[in-house]
Amino acid sequence: MTTTTASTPAGARKRRRIDDPEEYRMSIGDHLEELRWRLILALVGFVVAFGICLAFGNQVIVFFCRPLTATLLQRGINPQLYMTSAPETFMVYIRISLICGAAIGSPWMLYQFWLFVAAGLYRHERRWVLRYLPLSITLLLSGMVFVYLLVLPWSMNFFIGWGIDIPVPGPRSGLVENTPPLLALPLIAGDPADPALNGIWYNTVEHRIKVRINGQDSVIQFLPTGLVAPHISLEPYINLVVMMLIVFGLAFQLPIVVMALLKIGIVEADQLRRARRVVYFALLIVSAAITPGDVITVTVALLLPLILLYEFGIFLGTRGERAAPAAEED
């Protein structure tokens, strides 16, 4: 009996230490030691993820370049990218591995950060974080997937089409009679299994002219006949893709921002509803500023999702206001 009564307050004290940050006190040295270990564990997780991405770096680069190469192939253009300096490809390889390693290791790093911060939060504060953090991550990933599947193909098709459709100025060459026999390249949906020595053919799948010289295949550049021919370098393209992924991922956090404004009480839901026209116009300007492409791309790619996300944020904010009294009773 004595043991039971002694253990019960101990369990209650343990629960209070978890639920009430006022009773979970540590010295500055203990806080720094706890922070140091959380940072070490987070760094270990990042290094492991970075090592995995290094092992598959080439596949990751191909994945990032697929929207561009698919557009080039659709227009019958050689899908190869170029490097303008010797270390360019290697630096892109390292940068992509770092970015993907940070993305893959972010759940583990956020978990370590949460273990350090959660002890200083009240129970209702932890509940709000745990409720909306998965939504924030989902919105971030949704914005990135939206960019990769829709915005990048639209943008690449617009940019490349805009350039190659410009005609070459000057007189056009006419038809010439009595020409000598022309060389007819064989059209092959791939590469021949055993090409002849110094053989030449056109690969209809890759849209490239290939020549077998000294047992190795070489590629002859195949470009459109317009004034401008695409000569795209790897590093600027990867920078564009990473920038768009980050911008759209952050833009898709709009519902969280709107809900936070309503929850804190900076604005009211009725004010946000009455200001729809002004907000929609501001979203149009933001979309046009951060989204490359034509008017259709700007409108469909970012403006409409932002409008829907804005309304979703109002819904979350008003729902949170209705649920606030119940949360306080808990």
Image (cartoon, rainbow, N blue to C red):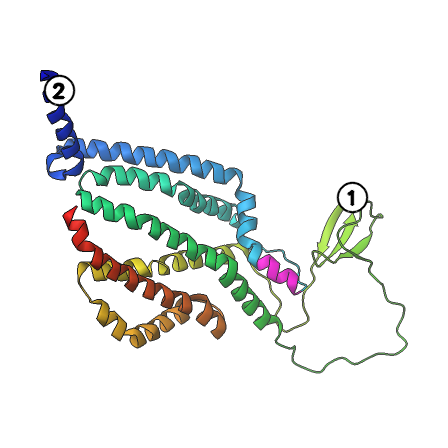
Q: Please, is residue 42 above or below residue 243 in the view?
A: above
Residue 191's x, y, as percent? 76, 50
| Crowd band around label 2 with a 10 angstrom C-alpha radius: few (<14), some (14–19), many (20+) | few
Of residue 265 and residue 211, the one placed in the foreground of this image is 265
Along the viewing direction, whichever of 297 and 272 lies nearer the viewer = 272
Q: Is residue 72 left or right of residue 204?
A: left
Kind of residue indicated by mark 2:
Thr
> Going 89% across and 68% down the picture, which residue do you hit?
181
Q: Which residue is mark 1?
A: 215
Q: Is residue 71 magenta?
A: yes
Q: Look at the image and give the residue range highlighted in magenta.
A: 68-75
Residue 185 part of the magenta segment: no
Q: Residues within 10 Å of mark 1 (few under 14, many from 20)?
A: few
Q: Position of residue 52 (x, y in %)?
A: 48, 37
Q: Quadrant of residue 6?
A: top left
The residue shown at (69%, 60%) is 221
Pick the quarter of the image with the C terminus: top left
- Residue that badge 2 annotates: 4
Q: Residue furthest top?
A: 2
Q: Main secondary structure of the magenta part?
A: helix
Q: Is residue 179 visible?
A: yes
The answer to whether residue 86 shows anywhere in this view is no
Dot 1 or dot 2, earlier in sequence: 2
Residue at disc 1, secondary structure = loop
Which residue is outermost to the front? 1
Disc ID at residue 319: none
Q: Position of residue 48 (x, y in %)?
A: 43, 34
Q: Nearer the viewer, residue 83 or 315?
A: 315
